[in-house]
Amino acid sequence: MKGKKRERIIRVLLNEPDGSLTKYRVAKNAGTSVSWTIEYLRSLEDLGLIVKTKVKDFEGLLNEWFRISKMPRYFDFFINDPKSFLKEVNYEYTLTTYFADTLTNRILFPSRADVYIRKEDFNKWRDSLLEKGLMGKGNFRLLLGDEHISYNKIKVDGLWIVSKPQLMIDLKREGGVCLQSYEKMVKEYV
């Protein structure tokens, strides 16, 4: 859980980089204790990444997040029309990487829908996907992540996508052509 707490705090800071949040509000938004949050914020300050809650080195903080994060557990599927499926589904989700980039940055070809879901919803998702397609390497990936990944999610063209900082870290983690989109986002966001 320690890694998830650190990721949650960084996610909150990168979504509100102007320093307008109090340390107490960062803790509440991250779902972490105030004392632990203050301690971790102090360590980020010692690294020169923030001052109080203001992000001083946006890309440096992204790199710190990348360093401590782990690839979530995932399951691959193939279905005919991922976009229509997501518009019809009644479960909570947030899109990231290729499809999310197509809706925001418009650089990547939407070759795969990477979808964060809650772990407890996996069986419902799997059953719904198997009604439409097959399990195995394909164009639809379920990512079992911390529910906080949906923090500050946005709706674009009827689809829920992760916040811009979360999308950046996911694009960087994906690597390859996704790095082009990541670099564009960092330049625009900073």
Image (cartoon, rainbow, N blue to C red):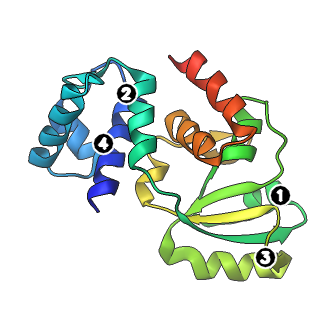
- Looking at the image, is mark 3 or mark 4 nearer the viewer? 3
* Residue of label 2: 16
Counting residues from the start of the chain, the first of labels 2 and 1 encountered is 2
- Residue 11, how many percent across, how many down? 39, 40
Query: What type is the residue that disc 3 sits on?
Result: Gly
Q: Quadrant of residue 77?
A: bottom right
Mark pair 2, 1: CA separation = 32 Å
- Residue 9, how many percent across, how many down? 30, 42
Tell me if residue 124 comes above or below residue 117 in the rendering: below
Mark pair 1, 3: CA separation = 20 Å
Mark pair 3, 4: CA separation = 34 Å
Query: What type is the residue that disc 2 sits on?
Result: Glu
* Residue of label 3: 136
Query: What type is the residue that disc 1 sits on?
Result: Ser
* Residue of label 4: 9
- Residue 148, how many percent across, how many down? 41, 53
Q: Residue at x 48, y 77 (%)?
A: 120
- Residue 185, how many percent across, how many down? 61, 25
Could you say whether the residue bearing mark 2 is in a helix, strand or loop?
loop
Tell me if residue 64 comes above or below residue 126 in the rendering: above
Mark pair 3, 2: CA separation = 38 Å
Q: Which mark is residue 84?
A: 1
Mark pair 1, 4: CA separation = 34 Å
Counting residues from the start of the chain, the first of labels 3 and 2 encountered is 2
Query: What crowding class fits label 2: few (fewer than 14 Cα within 10 Å), some (14-19), or many (20 or more)?
Result: some
Q: Which mark is residue 170?
A: none
Answer yes or no: is residue 20 visible: no
Could you say whether the residue bearing mark 1 is in a helix, strand or loop?
helix
Could you say whether the residue bearing mark 4 is in a helix, strand or loop?
helix
Could you say whether the residue bearing mark 3 is in a helix, strand or loop?
loop
